[in-house]
Image (cartoon, grey):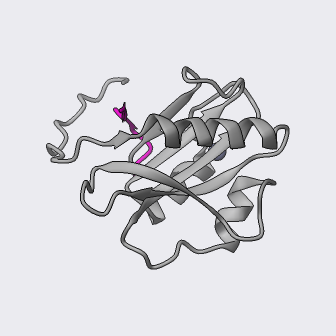
Amino acid sequence: MGIFKKEKKHSTPIEWKITKRCLNLILECAKSSFPNEFGGLLRIDKEKKDTIVELVMIPGTISGDAHAIFRLHMLPIDYSIVGTIHSHPSYSNYPSDADIQFFRKTGKIHIIVANPFNTNSWKAYDFNGDEINLIVI
Ligand code: ZN
């Protein structure tokens, strides 16, 4: 973008995947939390470490301001947690400045689900807020 040539990124060995079941659960939770935000954590499979298999709800909070939720609940020291998911009640699934600041502090992959919370309204980002490909399996 702009006048700067984008530097070639380090080749990342991980090709992230998520199970359809897990994605559907995320979409359902985001939808049922609307108009509030929904926030949760992403857990990978014990063997297939590039595959997100589980949505971990943050204890005590089903919905609210996702940014506040993540501030209040530090990510657990649990190496099976690779990132976060939160919803946007708006139609934008792009990370806000606050999102990117948060992404930079923690996690490798972050999903944002926007209204209308369907299979086309989500995107995945790396710690830097750059969009990454997440394959649904
Ligand atoms: Zn956000």
On the image, the x and y values in percent for residue 6 come to 25, 31
* Ligand number 1: quarter of image: top right
Q: Residue at x 75, y 35 (%)?
A: 31
Indicate the quadrant where residue 46 lies.
bottom left
- Left or right of residue 122, residue 37 in this image: right
**109 up-or-down from 59: above or below:** above
Q: How many marks?
A: 0
Q: Residue at x 85, y 38 (%)?
A: 35
Q: Where is residue 120 drawn, in percent x and y?
A: 55, 20
User: Would residue 88 be visible to someone looking at this image?
Assistant: no
Where is residue 7, by image quadrant?
top left
Q: Main secondary structure of the magenta part?
A: loop
Is residue 131 located in the magenta-colored stretch of the structure?
yes
Q: Is residue 119 magenta?
A: no
Q: Residue at x 60, y 42 (%)?
A: 26
What's the magenta region? Answer: 127-137
The image shows residue 28 at horizontal and vertical percentages of 68, 37
Locate residue 78 relative to residue 49 in the image: left or right. right
Q: Which residue is nearer to you in this view: 5 or 101?
A: 101
Q: Give the farthest residue toward the top.
A: 120
Which residue is located at x 37 percent, y 57 percent?
A: 44
Rendered location of residue 132, percent (x, y): 35, 36
Relative side of 89 to 7, left or right: right
- Give left or right: position of 31 versus 70: right
Between residue 93 and residue 56, name the one nearer to us: 56
